[in-house]
Image: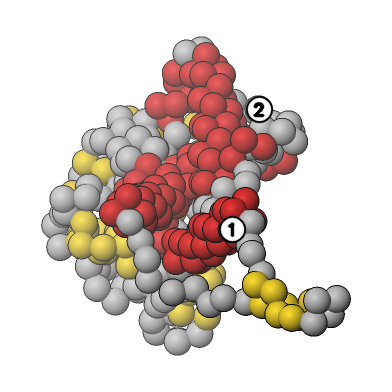
Amino acid sequence: MAKVKYYYDSENLAYTKIKTRKRIKIGYALLFLLASALFGFLILVLLINTPYFKTPKDRLQTREIENLKLQYAILNKKMDEIDDVAEALEERDNNIYRIYFNKAEIPDSIRKEGFRDPNRYKKLEGYNNSQLVLNTTKRIDKLSKELAIQSKSLDEILKLASTKGNLLLAIPAIQPVQNENLKRVASGFGYRIDPFTKVRKMHNGMDFTANTGSPVYATGDGVIERADNTASGYGNHVVIRHGFGYESLYAHLSKYNCRPGQKVKRGDIIGYVGSTGRSEGPHCHYEVHKDGKVVNPLNFYYGNISAVEYVAISHMANQENQSLD
């Protein structure tokens, strides 16, 4: 029951009952309801924005976001692998193909240049995971542009190659030991530890370990210049003069399958793996010379291996370990 309120009337010297108008009562009721609704709304907003109160829709959205983050991580890992292959293609393009045909290499400033439009990625900004999406999109665009440039370069090389078939046949372009006979690439081109003196010295070729008697193949068309064991340290070895300034050498053979003056084609068996001369074990020591200067054979294996295989061999060959000769 509501309390009855009075006020003192000084004129009549008596207490008079206070009568509340109906519309004021209604106003108070409405004000109370409005305040209650506002308070309830504020509480609801606070609950919704805390981690302790999530609707099924919120939980589903959270799972989808986490799944998208995982997919982006997988995509970036695959792009890392594509980056390695693209780098290998670019290196071979600049250091082999374009040199073969006297074409200037394509500088990194062109190959790696991004897109100059400042508004290209504007639509991806302003979201919770914008940086993740933005970085991945930029990487995809960069790779796409690099591959487009590489494709145009290879189209140009292909046109030049159609008129220079003899040169392409002469270039030492395959491994001297096939992969099915290959145990491993024991040592690559560059400074390595000498197995006999244990001193770091220049290793002018690559060592391919294989069982004694495994075939050794001519890596390009040419004429046998030497097939003897008179050069110090090489043991039984073969030198092929390919022309166009190219020569290749195959050392530590167990025996020959060719003679000086003989013409050979790429892929012909010219000898067999051995350990003659200054050698730590059965292997083929292989060198490539261009215009009288020794060059890295790794840059020439485009004739019988894929880009992925090339990357794997490159990683092994670039390890600074001990050579076998």
The residue positioned 65% from the left and 72% from the top of the image is: 17
The residue positioned 49% from the left and 66% from the top of the image is: 43
Q: CA distance from mark 1 to mark 2?
A: 95 Å
Residue that extends furthest to the bottom in the rendered view of this protein: 198
Hey, what amino acid is under mark 2?
Lys
Name the mark nearer the viewer: 1 or 2: 1
Q: Quadrant of the N terminus?
A: bottom left
Say which residue label 2 marks: 103
Coordinates of residue 108 in the picture (x, y in percent): 67, 42
Q: Quadrant of the C terminus?
A: bottom left
Q: Earlier in the sequence, mark 1 or mark 2?
A: 1
Hey, what amino acid is under mark 1?
Lys
Secondary structure found at label 2: loop
Q: Is residue 45 left or right of 311 when viewed as pictured?
A: right
The residue positioned 26% from the left and 43% from the top of the image is: 217
Q: Is residue 218 visible?
A: no
The residue positioned 40% from the left and 77% from the top of the image is: 322
Coordinates of residue 266 in the picture (x, y in percent): 31, 33
Name which quarter of the figure residue 59 lies in.
bottom left
Residue that extends furthest to the front in the rendered view of this protein: 12
Say which residue label 1 marks: 25
Name which quarter of the figure residue 195 lies in.
bottom left
Q: Residues within 10 Å of mark 2 (few under 14, many from 20)?
A: few
User: Residue 85 versus residue 139: which sits nearer the camera?
Assistant: 139
Q: Residues within 10 Å of mark 1 (few under 14, many from 20)?
A: few
Q: Is residue 181 visible?
A: yes
Q: Which mark is residue 220?
A: none
Coordinates of residue 64 in the picture (x, y in percent): 33, 50
